[in-house]
Structures are given as structure tokens and as C-alpha cells.
Image: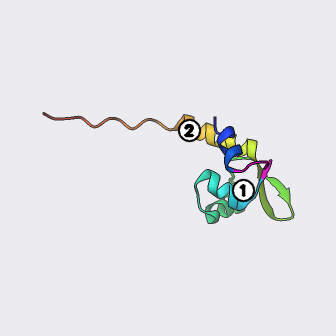
Amino acid sequence: AHLPLLQTMFPGKIILNIDEISLAVGVHKKRIYRWSCEKNMPFKCLEDSGRILASIIEVARYLDDASLTKQPEPEPKVIE
């Protein structure tokens, strides 16, 4: 469900760089660098001489999985 959205955000891109990943995932670049240093990336990255790159498909898959695990917020009870 997220792949078409990412393809619209990044037309013609197959591989996303750190700035694009940050924008797509909605986290600051520092967090992505921390994930990388801790070997705790939530999606597969490509090795390219120290640069953090990821397939647009991997990022979309991560976003799809993350949205499936989110539970809907309970509706507040109205007291009348």
C-alpha cells in the first residue's frame, strides 16, 4: 500500500538515500544513523562505501508492516 505513495514522492527512484529514507519513514536522520551503528535497521540496507541506501521496495515493506502492527486508538467514552 505504501509503494505507490513512495513512487509518487520519489519518481523514478529505485534506491533511496538517507535523506529520502528519513522523509519516507518520518524519523530524523540521526535515528537512522543510530539504527545503522547499532545494526538494528528495521529494513534491509545496501552496502555502498559507508553510505546508507535502501530499496524503495524495502522501505515500503517496512511501512506496510509498521502500519499493520499499529492498533487503533480506542474511542473516548462520552459521559452524558
| Residue 49 is covered by the magenta coloring | no
Secondary structure beneath label 1? loop
Q: Secondary structure at mark 2?
A: helix
Say if residue 38 shows up in the picture. no
Residue depicted at 71% across the width and 44% down the height: 7
Q: Earlier in the sequence, mark 1 or mark 2?
A: 1
- Point 69% across, 61% down: residue: 19
Image check: 15 left or right of 32? right
Residue marked by disc 2:
67
Amino acid on which disc 2 is placed: Ser
Quadrant holding the C terminus: top left
Label 1 crowd bin: few (<14), some (14–19), many (20+), radius 10 Å = few
View extreme (right): residue: 49
| Residue 16, placed above or below residue 79 | below
Q: Quadrant of residue 50?
A: bottom right
Asked whether 72 or 9 is in front, the reply is: 9
- What residue range appears in magenta? 10-15
Q: Position of residue 8 (x, y in %)?
A: 68, 45
The residue drawn where x is 68% and y is 53% is 40
Front disc: 1 or 2: 2
Q: Main secondary structure of the magenta part?
A: loop
Q: Is residue 70 left or right of residue 12?
A: left
User: What residue type is disc 1 on?
Assistant: Lys
Q: Is residue 11 magenta?
A: yes
Please tell me whether residue 59 is drawn above or below residue 49 in the rendered image: above
How has the structure been colored for display? rainbow
Q: Which residue is mark 1?
A: 39
